[in-house]
Image (cartoon, rainbow, N blue to C red):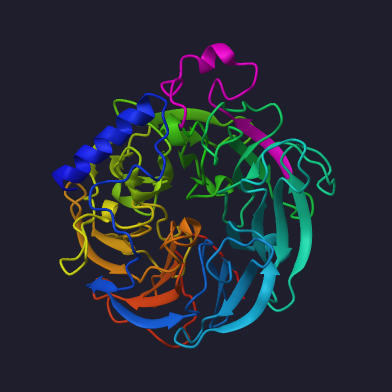
Amino acid sequence: MTNAVRFGCLFLWLLVLSGCHPGRAVLPPGTMTELDRNQYSDNMSLLAHHFPGDNRPGKLQMMAIGDRRYLFQFVFPGENWDWVFARGEILDVTDPLHPVVVNDFGFRGYSINLAWHAPSSRWILMEVQGTFGDPYDWAPGPRGFRLLDVTDPTEVTVISSFSTDGGDPSRIWQGGSGTHRDYWDGGRYAYVGAADRDAYYPEREHGMARYSRSLRIIDMLDPAQPKEVGRWWVSGQRRDEEDARSKWRSRNDPLAYDNFHGPMYVPKKVEEGGRYGYGGWGAFGVLIHDVSNPSAPSLVGHWDTDSHIPGPVIPHHTVDVTRLDRGFVITTPEAIATECQEAWHESHLLDVEDPMNIRWLASLPSPTPPSEAPYDDFCQKPGRFGPHNAAHLKAPGRPDPNFAIYTYFNAGVQAFDLSDPRDPKISGYFIPEQGGRMENPESYERGTDSVFVEWDRRLVWVASNTGLYLLATPLLGDPVLGALEVEEWSLPGLNAGHP
């Protein structure tokens, strides 16, 4: 950041710490008054731009049937977050230059997990319900998740529903928060973040954290009857734990994200000897759990910055475990306030070879605008700026150990060279044009939201509020633009036996 922008942001941080939430009228020096309709790239090339004009913030998941590949994403047509017309879209991307919509309303969940369930020989989609939902007990609607059989992507059928408040999932009135970012790899257990009526209801202004979610472990052996088998929470997350809550570092922060954001990644299935789960717990830090006994998960590792990072930023959003075989993970935050009206929080590389003694290695460098951009700092560009989503853990092919890519909202996607984990470097970027209208902040504030890498075809899918982009990069090698059977997936044993 420039010195002027840093000074402006420091002033805003002090306002946050004092309990004053700065509004949009307080903006960093030099803030743009119009949207940037230009596109920028370095070391990344655009192969195709699909569905221009669509707002596509939904998470991306993929399945394969023979040499055919299907991409799943939740889509908001037009510039707004209009849930009435939103749809779960299934695309045949076997020919990535000419995707075909095979089901334009196959599911309803904004956040999804897709995996091959070997015991029942089905591709199953797990979709969240009540992701934030209406957090109040008097509001109707499901709070939990649904399981869908998507083996035939043109004929999706419901297998079951699960309510995280423990009651009948068919009820109109359910309690708690529902789930947000969950993880399931098709194995025996799913790991979800949820809160029921007994959860602490934070007296926060943070609109994304009405209930304080904690970890639930769900037995998925029979997808028709998922069952909760274990749970874990930070002391103070229950309503009656006021004394413990008074000792939290975030206790005096009116915008703190006191929450398990999720997902918790368990990269090796428990039934195959897996032991550890890695999760981003917002203001609570990075937590590593021993889940070898799913009925009694236990905390074994914790890491956080030296002092509390004031909200509304989510300090620890996702823990990327793609490079565990190299001994480190990457914890990334999620920027919440637009135009940097919040504390900046770094993304950190952490040595987790000893989960009980997590050590800091380095921080990812902060992106800077291209020289031809009409601003000197991304804080001056309308919308959020900062990391959000990594390329998903589950994908076709073997991940490149030295390549990582993250969405940065108004800074597009940023690629990083991790060949030296103590000195990571930005190695490329792609920044699409901004969509929306300046007078409607909701239409542009999220910008570039999700990214997915097909490691074997060396393709990068980028979802933004101006459509779906297909990229290639010399950092991965020449792209494969035709049909290709998946020979291996990104995790050992993932989707084993799929057709």
Q: Residue at x 72, y 63 (%)?
A: 148
Q: Locate residue 379 relative to residue 457 in the image: left or right.
A: left
User: Front-most of 119 and 25?
Assistant: 25
Report x, y in % for residue 282.
45, 36
Q: Is residue 34 visible?
A: yes
- Looking at the magenta stretch, what is its main secondary structure? loop
Q: Residue at x 50, y 34 (%)?
A: 290
Numbered label tally = 0
Above/below status of 406 relative to 52: above
Indicate whether residue 205 is drawn in magenta: no
Magenta residues, start to end:
227-255
Location of the C terminus by quadrant is bottom right
Indicate whether residue 251 is drawn in magenta: yes
User: Front-most of 290 and 412?
Assistant: 412
Which residue occupies the extreme top position in the image?
243
User: Front-most of 25 and 309?
Assistant: 25
Above/below status of 484 relative to 399: below
Report x, y in % for residue 402.
26, 60
Report x, y in % for residue 12.
31, 35
User: Front-most of 92 and 241?
Assistant: 241
Q: Is residue 287 visible?
A: no
Report x, y in % for residue 274.
50, 44
Q: Residue at x 51, y 41 (%)?
A: 261
Name the quadrant containing residue 132: top right
